[in-house]
Amino acid sequence: MTADVSGRAGDVVPTRGRPTGLRFDGRVTYLWWGQDVNNEDCAAARAGRLYTFASEADCWSMAAAHGWAADGGPADQRVVTTDVEPAQEWLRGRRMALNPEAGLNLWNWATDVAYSTGRPWNDRGGLRDGCYHKLLAANVPWAYGTASYHPRWTPRQLRALREVLNQAVHLLRAATRG
């Protein structure tokens, strides 16, 4: 089955996928994730909601039941769980500084979820693009020609960053909960 990302009427399913975990809102949820026919990252979704699973095994079972193509099988891969809770803690004021890895992961997951579900996602624009690039540079500094990078944020950038990441949290909640 391939992704139907144009009309959003049917299922959106990666052409080849695998289970992945997302630690968010105090729990781990498993998703079927991969790339679609356009090589865009996506998660299995239907009617604007992600297929979510309580366990890796449940995710594999659903994939098998629906004939979703896999990148290998359960024995072939280690399931990666992405933890975005440090970014949520920063948004709640429980951390003084944003963890750049969690911030970038939250932003990227929201991008994938918006694409998969057809939900609105406003993460682009000069100031927001600059924030994204700072997060990216902190995570992959070698891509920017340096050994390390620690972002320094202006007050305007911090406001933009909070807006985007708060929007990301709401998007993920809407797409994963009933």
Image: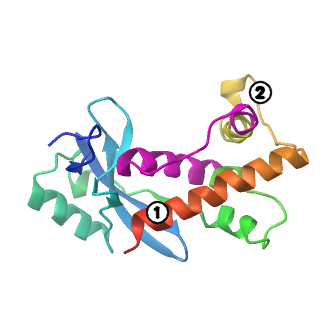
Q: Is residue 116 left or right of residue 124?
A: left
Q: Is residue 44 left or right of residue 137?
A: left
The residue type indicated by label 2 comes to Thr
Q: Can residue 105 be found in the magenta stretch?
A: yes
Residue at horizontal 50%, vertical 51%? 109
Label 1 sits on residue: 22
Q: Quadrant of the N terminus?
A: top left
Instruction: Give the main secondary structure of the magenta stretch.
Output: helix
Q: For residue 85, which quarter of the picture?
A: bottom right
- Check the image and report above or below for 75 versus 89: above
Label 1: few (<14), some or many (≥20) within 10 Å?
A: many
Ranked by sequence position, the earlier of labels 2 and 1 is: 1
User: In this picture, which residue range is highlighted in magenta?
Assistant: 104-130
User: Which numbered tag is attached to residue 146?
Assistant: 2
Q: Which element type, helix, strand or loop, lies under badge 2?
A: loop
Residue at horizontal 22%, vertical 49%? 9
Q: Is residue 151 left or right of residue 16?
A: right
The residue type indicated by label 1 comes to Leu
Question: Residue 137's x, y, as percent?
Answer: 71, 35
